[in-house]
Image (tube, rainbow, N blue to C red):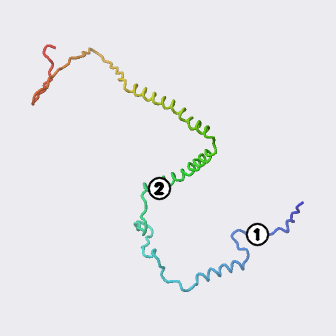
Amino acid sequence: MTTLPEPTQQPHAPQAGQPATDSAARAFLAQIEEALALDGLPDEPTGPHTLIPMGGYGPTPPVTQPGRPPMSQKATDASVLMLSAGIASIPIGGMTSLVVYTLGHVDPTALAIAAATPATIALPILALARFLGRARQVVEAAPPVIQQTYNGTVIHDERTVHSKNSGVWVSNRNQLPAGD
């Protein structure tokens, strides 16, 4: 049986953000002051960042940074797409490896039957798809039904004009034959 301590015997932790002891806080501050007071640091910072004028706030144009130029949005999208496709290929490759490993332990007769099954299922489906595609072409090739409604007297003229074009210089005069 476990005995719990009395409430008066429980330890008290310092409040959040307060150091454990005053002496630890003073030692920490002394270390910071010592680090800031180190001599031997150059008066001016060195490095390539000091060569580029820094803009403040406002209409300051961006400054070209040294190194590789930034990519366009199209290039960024393409790289994200390539990375996603690469990551997506990992599960596919793993499953393929698992299938190949498993097939090494399978009876050859059962393997031949399993390999022939998709073809026996796919052939009728492909034949049906081809039949439906041809049926759709037949329906689309049929002439459309045109219904026209007229009010009043309608004269429908179905005369045919025949013209003969022969010679080096041809003059077409499509005129209705006399008497029609």
Q: Viewer-proximal residue, 172 or 112?
A: 112
For the point 68% across and 70% down, the residue is: 17
Image coordinates of residue 175 in percent, x first then y, are 14, 21
For the point 43% across and 62% down, the residue is: 70
Q: Residue lying furthest bottom in this view?
A: 39
Q: Viewer-proximal residue, 94 or 31?
A: 94
**Which numbered marker is on residue 23?**
none
Q: Viewer-proximal residue, 54 or 131?
A: 131
Residue ID for mark 2 = 79
Image coordinates of residue 99 in percent, x first then y, are 60, 46
Q: Residues within 10 Å of mark 2 (few under 14, many from 20)?
A: few
For the point 45% across and 75% down, the residue is: 48
Q: Secondary structure at mark 1?
A: loop
Q: Mark 1 or mark 2, which has the lower sequence index?
A: 1
* 162 up-or-down from 66: above or below: above
Q: Viewer-proximal residue, 158 or 78?
A: 78
Q: Is residue 14 left or right of residue 3?
A: left
